[in-house]
Image: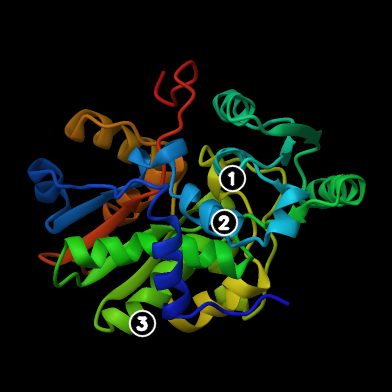
Amino acid sequence: MNRRPELQDILAAAERVEPHIHKTPIHTCRSIDRLAEAQLFFKCENFQKVGAFKFRGACNAVFSLSESEARRGVATHSSGNHAAAIALAARRRGIPAHIVMPVNAPKVKQDAVAGYGGKITWCEPTVESREQTVARVIEQTGATFIHPYNDERVIAGQGTVALELFDQVSELEVVIAPVGGGGLVSGVAIVAASLSRSTRILGAEPREADDACRSLQAGRIMPAVEPHRTLADGLRTSLGPLTFGIIQELVNEIITVSEESIVQAMRTIWERMKIIVEPSAAVVLAAMMRGQLDLQGKRIGLILSGGNVDLEALPWC
């Protein structure tokens, strides 16, 4: 049974993953500040290894395994960034990685998993197919399952983003993180609750994949509606019991944004900041620019979760 990680777990994760990860930079942009009428500090996890924050949680989980567990390898299911992160973390530890991927996963993410040595098994793009397929893989291999987000080791690893952010930027009044399965925003919220209690934690998700918002409103997990129609492929997953409980308690609000605003925010970051982010990362700026939040003049941290984009299929082309 997964337990909720605490600050000490995240501190331990930071020590465990420090030899393997990048400490990612904070970028600012005056022209975007003027558009947002606020001071924005972008935590650039698009510069993380595998191009996404997911390497933090994957690294912590893989390097937490005992030697006997590690020898049997690891298994997971993911549409991309977590899959690549597990594959690279496993390669660094010298163990097999069995990755179940939906057939519609972006090619750039398929190629990344294969490039890191992950052994891919394909499934249909449904939660049921993912879970059934990974169960078969585990039965055949004896590998240890590492859930993409509903795992205390993964959440603790993702929380190291916030340890860095609060160390790099003082007096943040708000932090906005993308929400898919909820591992990132859960880790960030746990750190904030201990180290920066006055900081509001907001989640951002596509309106076309608004299960987290609906779940908070209903008081129970509301699964993501399939088929998914959002460009933000990394945010198509439903919350897990562990992440839902943390978000219920510690996250102040979930903001939903349109597909058009995601594309516009993504393009704004590319054009104004000269950095590459994927649609799942752009939701945080889309939430900021929606104009319905009273954030004028505030110091706001935005977590740019990743930068893995299929350059052959840019959304504005």
Judge left or right: residue 18 versus residue 102.
left
Q: Earlier in the sequence, mark 2 or mark 3?
A: 2
Badge 1 marks a residue whose secondary structure is: helix
Question: Mark 2: few, some, or many residues within 10 Å (few <14, many ≥20)?
Answer: some
- Mark 1 or mark 3: which comes first in sequence? 1
Q: Residues within 10 Å of mark 3 (few under 14, many from 20)?
A: some
Q: Quadrant of residue 240?
A: bottom right
Q: Amino acid at mark 3?
A: Ala
User: Few, some or many C-alpha atoms within 10 Å of disc 1 (few <14, some 14-19, many ≥20)?
Assistant: some
Name the residue tied to disc 3.
193
Q: Residue at x 47, y 37 (%)?
A: 50
Q: Residue type at mark 2?
A: Phe
Q: How is the image coloured?
A: rainbow
Do labels 1 and 2 touch, CB within 8 Å?
Answer: yes
Where is residue 154 shown, x and y percent of the image? 56, 61
- Which one is nearer the viewer's eye here, 299 or 229? 299
Residue at 36% in and 40% down: 46
Vertical placement of residue 247 versus 155, above or below: below
Residue 172, visible in the rendered structure: yes
Place of residue 192 in the rendered image (x, y in percent of width and height, measured from the top left): 33, 76
In the image: residue 153, left or right of residue 15: right
**Which of pointers 1 and 3 indicates the residue nearer the eye?**
1
Q: Which residue is mark 2?
A: 63
Rendered-image quadrant of the N terminus: bottom right
What residue is shown with label 1?
A: 93
Q: Which mark is residue 299?
A: none
Q: Toward the viewer: 257 or 116?
A: 116
Above or below: residue 123 compared with residue 19: above
Q: Is residue 131 above or below residue 156?
A: above
Which residue occupies 49% across, 58% down? 179
Disc 1 marks a residue whose amino acid type is: Arg
